Image (spheres, helix red, strand yellow):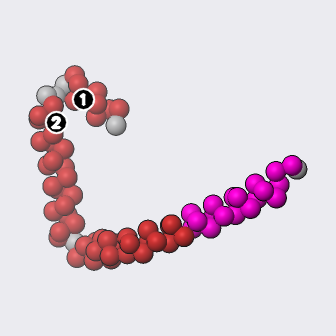
Amino acid sequence: MFLAELIEKYFVSPTLFRVIRLARIGRILRLIKGAKGIRTLLFALMMSLPALFNIGLLLFLVMFIYAIFGMSNFAYV
């Protein structure tokens, strides 16, 4: 990000820099739109995000319980 901030500050006006950034994002979106395999993969990832969130929450809960258990058992070691 440092290089982008330098270019934005000294070489290119902020408005032009935003337009260039939007064009880059648009090019990526157009590439994804054309590739059916990537689109299917991203769709599957988006559909699995709620389940991944639940798994992450469960993993955090288990780690938190083990951390409390470890702190209470090994507090004076």
> Is residue 73 visible from the viewing direction of this image?
yes
Please identify the quarter of the rendering in which residue 58 is found.
bottom right
| Secondary-structure class at tag 2 | helix
Which residues make up the magenta segment?
A: 59-76
> Is residue 41 visible from the viewing direction of this image?
no
Q: Is residue 19 left or right of residue 42?
A: left
Residue behind mark 2: 17
Please identify the quarter of the rendering in which residue 8 is found.
top left
Q: Residue at x 35, y 72 (%)?
A: 45
Above or below, 4 against 69 in this view is: above
Q: Is residue 28 left or right of residue 61?
A: left
Q: Position of residue 32 (x, y in %)?
A: 22, 66
CA–CA distance between discs 2 and 1?
Answer: 9 Å
Quick one: 57 or 20, which is closer to the camera? Answer: 57
Task: Name the main secondary structure of what is drawn in magenta.
Answer: helix
| Secondary-structure class at tag 1 | helix
**Does the magenta portion include 74?**
yes
Residue 7: numbered disc: 1
Please identify the quarter of the rendering in which residue 67 is found.
bottom right
Q: Position of residue 6 (x, y in %)?
A: 28, 27
Whether pointer 2 and pointer 1 mark residues with C-beta atoms closer than 8 Å, the reply is: yes
Q: Residue furthest front?
A: 72
**In terms of sequence position, does the residue under pointer 2 or pointer 1 come before the other?**
1
Q: Residue at x 32, y 71 (%)?
A: 46
Q: Position of residue 23 (x, y in %)?
A: 14, 49
**Does the magenta portion include 10?**
no
Residue type indicated by callout 2: Phe
Q: Residue at x 44, y 68 (%)?
A: 53
